[in-house]
Amino acid sequence: MLTDLTDEQLLRQTLAGDEDAFTVLYHRRQGPIFRFALHMSGSAQIAEEVTQDVFMFLLQRGQGFDAERGALGAYLFGVARNYVRRALERNYPEMMLSSPVEDEAASLLVENDPSEGIARRQTSAALWKAVLSLPEHYREVVVLCDLQEQSYADAAAAMGCAIGTIRSRLHRAHDMLSKKLQHSAAVAPGMASVTARCTS
Amino acid sequence: MTCREFKHSAAALTLWELSRSRDGQVLGHADACETCEMWLRKQRSLAASMRTLQAQTAGLEAGPDVERALRAAFRRTAATSTASPLSGVERYSDSLPLDPTDGLTPLAMRLSRFFEIGAYVAVAAAMVVGVFLGVQLLQQRSRASGTKISPVQGASVPASTQPVAQKPAPSLVEESSISSPERQPVTAAGSRVRRQRPSAESQTAAAAGPVVADVSQTSTDDGYVALMFCDPLSCSSDSQVVRMELPATGNTASQGVQPQMADVVVGYDGVVRAVRIVN
């Protein structure tokens, strides 16, 4: 069964011309890549483009992957990170002129339990907005470690830096996020009161 | 455990591990220290918010068009393995023709790329026009400085003994006592000396570097023939024009022929730079 194969085995078969292996690999990995790009950019369109670009890159230059240097998942996150950066740089002027990406990000949130109400949605929207406002290298570690639940080692492999760097950046990013969330609650006290009322 | 050790231990844990921490030392310090307890509470609150955000975006995936386009690209690259792998790639959400050299470019860049190329073309055109105008301006200036060299009244000074570049006008001119009547009065020494500083253009041109004279152009309109090649050090300095009588040969002297006169441009170093036969 193809689904029992590891990512590396699937990649080998894909590069040998096995379309089914590619399909299995795509279904296994496209979700995390898409969500990584989505959390980084706040735009579903950019996230889809990045996902397509990452797998096109894998088809064309997959031979360059070295399993001894890290897992395929980390490798794909590394490629996606570069594509996201490039997309954000290219789209920066358009994003500044059009509506803020945070609005789109908030609209993408899916509430699984409607009884939880608007409070959770607002909290998540505020958090995502805070994440999007972080400097890029802090945002990357938050998205990889906190939202994608990658280990420090995998995040370090994806970002090409030391584990200690990941730790220190994450620590700093958490402090920044806490301050931003406090600030947003202070600016919009209504939101805080709604949260308090709904959770009590 | 100190606050420093507490922070160090906390930094080693992920947000999830920290929020579920059962580490007795960490919790014990947080219970004892209000600041650290506050910090831990914030981290746990943040972890809970992260968990919520993660749950609300967990179901999001790329659309089916992405997979369709990738599979089509996979088949084409497999079928045309000899061709460029990028040539068969289809974009899922647009019908613009794909640039083969730009297969990995995200879709959102596509439109802005046209503007980018337009900007490059505009900059290139501006540079070409700028270079053209600059060359024109330089040519005009070189022509203007060439005509500015005017002979000092009395003795016509060679317009150019450096035919290639702008030559400074001879600045020290001595008029011979046998000059024409409308010329300046003659001094007791038989000659009148006037100084003329070189123009700004000539100084600039002189400083521009050595000049290699074109031998075919060493004769000027004034009838001067350059006798040497000039360099800025020697030719930009003051010079004199001296009218002198050429020594007659034996035959001409005995036949009573009128003596031959010549204007000679002599540099301050005594070297003759140009000569003109007067009659």
Image (spheres, coloured by chain):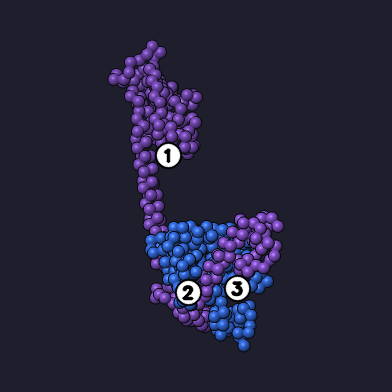
- In the depicted structure, whether residue B3 falls above or below residue A81: above
* Label 1 secondary element: loop
Residue located at (44% from left, 60% from top) = A189
Q: Colour of chain B?
A: purple
Q: What separation in Å lies between label 2 and label 1 (alpha carbons)?
A: 89 Å
**Labels 1 and 3 positioned on one and the same chain:** no
Numbered mark located on residue A116 in the image: 2
Residue tagged 1: B164
Residue tagged 3: A73
Q: Looking at this view, is B26 or B32 the one in front? A: B32
Of discs 3 and 2, which sits in the foreground?
Answer: 2
Quadrant that contains the C terminus of chain B: top left
Quadrant that contains the N terminus of chain B: bottom right
The amino acid type found where label 2 is placed reads Glu
Q: What separation in Å lies between label 1 and label 3 (alpha carbons)?
A: 70 Å
Mark 1 Cα within 10 Å, few/some/many (few <14, many 20+)?
A: some
Provide residue B24's location: percent of width, then percent of height: 70, 65
Q: Looking at this view, is B260 or B15 the one in front? A: B15
Q: Chain of mark 1?
A: B
Q: Colour of chain A?
A: blue
